[in-house]
Image (cartoon, rainbow, N blue to C red):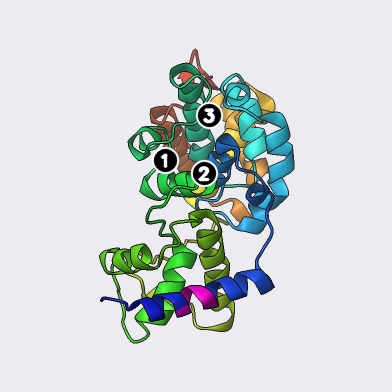
């Protein structure tokens, strides 16, 4: 699809008009510090903006630099991360902080390949950091941005792949100010999803997140939080702690099997170790 310049100008004007009138304010939008931008992008992966905003100030106060996070004990990091979900992201961010500290002199790298070499950073996150921290143009495609392009350019299509959206994202990009442009697109997409049947569902990349309550993700989180709060535990003590953490609604008859599975996974992922008959976080 080729867009004429007048149509591009009209599209941009509408998106920016909404941004001026109804743009959202988040604390990570008030900084250009690349470390804080990277932190926000990893926090926002599969997590609601309101949830991240509530955790932002305490986290940034504790870890204002890569060096601060790299030096923090894993137990402390996991306890501060609690409520953000997907604890492997906390481990990835801490690993990225360590590499930034040791290999990049504490400075978040600028190039996309260097950014993507960091733990937890994929194509979207790398390009978002480049746009929001460094003001560099590129194709930044996430759920709210998809919603805008699907709504305007593919109103009657289902299962639209990103490869058809990307040329339009590039053609309409405000190359002089990609930071403001993508914030404007994200806010417009968020508003669209509240007033229209979610256009993002027509993307081939769309998938509905499964409920957390009663899920295996909840068991994994309970194992990590129990160890972070209580320290080293015997398997029986850990099982009791996890049951307490889950509460009546999160427990199921096969909890022993589910905890054993979580222990196996978390050990393989580098979160914890089982040694001398006890389970502990692996710092």
* Residue at the image point whose x is 48% and y is 38% from the top: 88
- Circle 3 — which element? helix
Residue 121, numbered circle: 1
Q: CA distance from mark 3 to mark 1?
A: 12 Å
- Circle 1 — which element? loop
Quarter residue 126 falls in: top left
Disc 3 packing (10 Å; few <14; some 14–19; many ≥20)? many
Residue 94, numbered circle: 3
271 or 84: which is nearer to us? Answer: 84
The answer to whether 94 is drawn above or below residue 58 in the figure is above
* Residue at the image point whose x is 56% and y is 22% from the top: 70
From the top left corner, tell me how far across and down residue 28 is, in percent.
64, 47
Disc 1 packing (10 Å; few <14; some 14–19; many ≥20)? many
Q: Earlier in the sequence, mark 3 or mark 2?
A: 2
261 or 57: which is nearer to us? Answer: 57
Residue extent of the magenta highlight: 10-14
């Amino acid at each position: 699809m080729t867009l004429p310049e007048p149509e591009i100008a009209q599209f941009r004007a509408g998106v920016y008009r909404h941004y001026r009138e109804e743009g959202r304010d988040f604390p990570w939008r008030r900084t250009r510090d690349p470390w804080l931008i990277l932190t926000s992008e990893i926090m926002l992966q599969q997590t609601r903006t309101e949830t991240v905003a509530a955790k932002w100030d305490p986290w940034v106060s504790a870890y204002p630099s890569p060096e601060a996070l790299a030096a923090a004990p894993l137990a402390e990091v996991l306890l501060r991360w609690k409520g953000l979900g997907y604890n492997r992201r906390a481990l990835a961010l801490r690993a990225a902080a360590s590499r930034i500290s040791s290999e990049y002199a504490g400075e978040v790298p600028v190039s996309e390949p260097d950014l993507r070499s960091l733990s937890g950073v994929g194509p979207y996150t790398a390009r978002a950091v480049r746009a929001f921290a460094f003001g560099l143009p590129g194709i930044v495609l996430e759920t709210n941005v998809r919603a805008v392009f699907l709504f305007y350019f593919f109103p009657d299509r289902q299962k639209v792949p990103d490869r058809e959206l990307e040329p339009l994202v590039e053609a309409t990009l405000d190359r002089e100010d990609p930071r403001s442009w993508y914030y404007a697109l994200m806010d417009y997409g968020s508003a669209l999803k509240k007033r229209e049947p979610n256009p993002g569902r027509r993307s081939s990349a769309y998938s509905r997140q499964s409920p957390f309550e009663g899920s295996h993700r909840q068991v994994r989180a309970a194992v990590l939080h129990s160890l972070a709060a209580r320290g080293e535990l015997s398997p029986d003590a850990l099982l009791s702690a996890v049951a307490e953490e889950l509460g009546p609604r999160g427990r199921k008859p096969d909890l022993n099997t589910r905890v054993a599975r979580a222990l196996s996974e978390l050990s393989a992922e580098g979160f914890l170790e089982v040694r001398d008959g006890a389970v502990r976080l692996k710092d």
